[in-house]
Amino acid sequence: MVSLPLVSHIQIRTANRTDLPALEWDGEFTHFRRLFAEAYRLVELGEAIMWVAELPGVGIVGQLFVQVNSQNPALADGVKRAYIYGFRVQALYQGAGIGSRLLKTAEEDLIRRGFHVIALNVGQDNPEARRLYERFGYRVVSSEPGIWSYVDHLGRHQQVNEPAWRMEKHI
């Protein structure tokens, strides 16, 4: 974990197109390259927001994506419900309050936009993240199978099985 004075220099801001390579975190998430590009396409359409936590001199150390409109209105309906996903903080910076700042920023922005409910999924094998969400007032509303797929940076179809808890918060 890094020191708190260093973390006080973190800048939380919306992502721009030039940030996309940095979201791959030096190769750790290269396989999500196409997912990041698609998320940014949704930003350009006004259907999503991408937040990043940037440490000057280091780069992007955290990210949080919000879908405000979705083909699945139970997640995001463009009016009252929004869906948080792609929320992560680099391991070295976890536990220093960066995730809390990202989440608080996203929630405040959604309140300003008139949203009333935020949904998210958290892995059933990630109790630390679940505790963070519970501290922020999110409550488990269902179990999710967490089966999804994507096309990786090499064009290969990847299947993912991540059992999750669906959590929601009324804002």
Image (cartoon, rainbow, N blue to C red):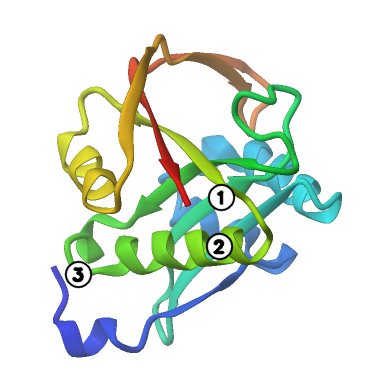
For image coordinates 36% across by 16% down, the residue present is 142
Residue in the foreground of this view, choosing between 34 and 12: 12
Q: Look at the numbered discs 2 and 3 and tell me whether their residues touch, using CB distance below 8 Å.
A: no
Residue on which disc 1 sits = 65
Q: Which x, y percent locates residue 72?
A: 69, 22
Q: Look at the numbered discs 2 and 1 and tell me whether their residues touch, using CB distance below 8 Å.
A: yes
Amino acid at pointer 3: Ala
Q: Which x, y percent locates residue 171?
A: 48, 52
Assess disc 2: are there few (<14), some (14-19) or many (≥20) residues with their C-alpha within 10 Å of its C-alpha.
Answer: many
Q: Which x, y percent locates residue 48?
A: 70, 49
* Quadrant position of residue 4: bottom left
Vertical comparison of 91 with 38: above or below: below
Q: Considering only order in the chain, which callout, 3 or 1, is on the residue closer to the N terminus? A: 1
For image coordinates 43% across by 15% down, the residue present is 146
Residue on which disc 3 sits = 96
Assess disc 1: are there few (<14), some (14-19) or many (≥20) residues with their C-alpha within 10 Å of its C-alpha.
Answer: many
Amino acid at pointer 1: Phe
Res 147 label: none
Q: Is residue 17 left or right of residue 150?
A: right
Q: Look at the numbered discs 1 and 3 and tell me whether their residues touch, using CB distance below 8 Å.
A: no
Amino acid at pointer 2: Trp
Vertical comparison of 133 with 145: above or below: below
